[in-house]
Image: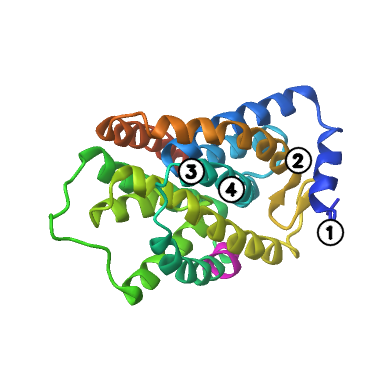
Amino acid sequence: MHCTGPLLFFKACCVTSLLDPVLIAELAALGLGTGFLAGLLGIGGGMLMVPFITIIMGHRGVASDLAVKMAIATSMATIIFTSVSSVRAHHKRGAVRWDIVRRLAPGIVIGSLLGSLGVFALLKGTVLAIVFALFVGFSATQMFLDRKPKPTRQMPGTAGQLSAGGAIGFISGLVGAGGGFVSVPFMTWCNISIHNAVATSAALGFPIAVANVLGYVVSGQSVQGLPGGSFGYIWLPALAVIAVCSVLTAPLGAKAAHNLPVKKLKRVFASILYLLAAYMLWKGLQG
């Protein structure tokens, strides 16, 4: 069954009412956890959602290749909601660099559409799982080593930020993440404080998510074998439950981000990413 029309999210909620309680509990727990991480680390929760949604869908009979793609797309869709919730909390603290958001956003939209409409549809899910693992592992290493940028290094000009935004959007579209695992290291490399980088990354999650979701919906319309409640590559039941739960905990994560020491915040970020990269690499190599 494929849901279309203006009442899309309402239909998703209706679909969830038909789900078994165990599945709803699994998705709710995932939503609460990823919402907190979205606020804490500015990663939109995608790094956690993709592996776990892949597992959940696989246990319900969805082919591994398709499960990875749908997990990536569904993860990205939930970021529309978590980014709004977490960025409000960061904005109240004056931590969002809106000047950076304005310069990166145009490139992000272009890069996201290129990734989700083109490359994502052409690649197999197992290949995307390996891409996910490699980029996440690289980002974790950069954060864990805590390399210090040169004191004179600054954000590039408008053209440079447009290009950087394009790369962030494109990579995010392939791995279903809000871009924090690329944008946070990039901004800290340019001497933006970690707290400002996390907050600004949360704000960038919204244009990344909207542009990519549009691409996933369009590119998934002709795919065969999608499970019930699908809208393109997006699995609406998971979107509905995770989105509702994640917006509850995203502000708590944002509050915690401003109370943790910088080095500890980076190490927490890196440790989580290593674990999830290892799982997705194993998943991709299995295929």
Choose the circle earlier in sequence order: 2 or 3: 3
Residue 166 visible here: no
Mark 2 neighbour class, 10 Å CA radius: few under 14, some 14 to 19, many 20 or more: many
Choose the circle earlier in sequence order: 3 or 1: 1
Q: Amino acid at mark 1?
A: Pro
- The answer to whether residue 161 is above or below residue 134 is below
Choose the circle earlier in sequence order: 4 or 3: 4
- The answer to whether residue 162 is above or below residue 45 is below
Mark 3 neighbour class, 10 Å CA radius: few under 14, some 14 to 19, many 20 or more: few
Q: Amino acid at mark 2?
A: Pro
**Left or right: residue 167 compared with residue 49:** left
Range of the magenta residues?
115-121
Q: Residue at point 27% right, 51% down?
A: 188
Instruction: Name the disc covering residue 6, or none.
Output: 1
Separation of disc 4 and disc 3 at Cα? Answer: 13 Å
Q: Amino acid at mark 4?
A: Val
Q: Which residue is mark 2?
A: 237
**Total number of numbered labels?**
4
Separation of disc 2 and disc 1 at Cα? Answer: 16 Å
Separation of disc 2 and disc 3 at Cα? Answer: 32 Å
Instruction: Name the disc covering residue 124, or none.
Output: none
Q: Residue at point 76% right, 58% down?
A: 224
Q: Secondary structure at mark 3?
A: helix
Viewer-side residue, 177 vs 100: 100
Between circles 3 and 1, the one closer to the viewer is: 3
Q: Amino acid at mark 3?
A: Lys
Q: Which residue is mark 3?
A: 92
Instruction: Name the disc covering residue 84, or none.
Output: 4
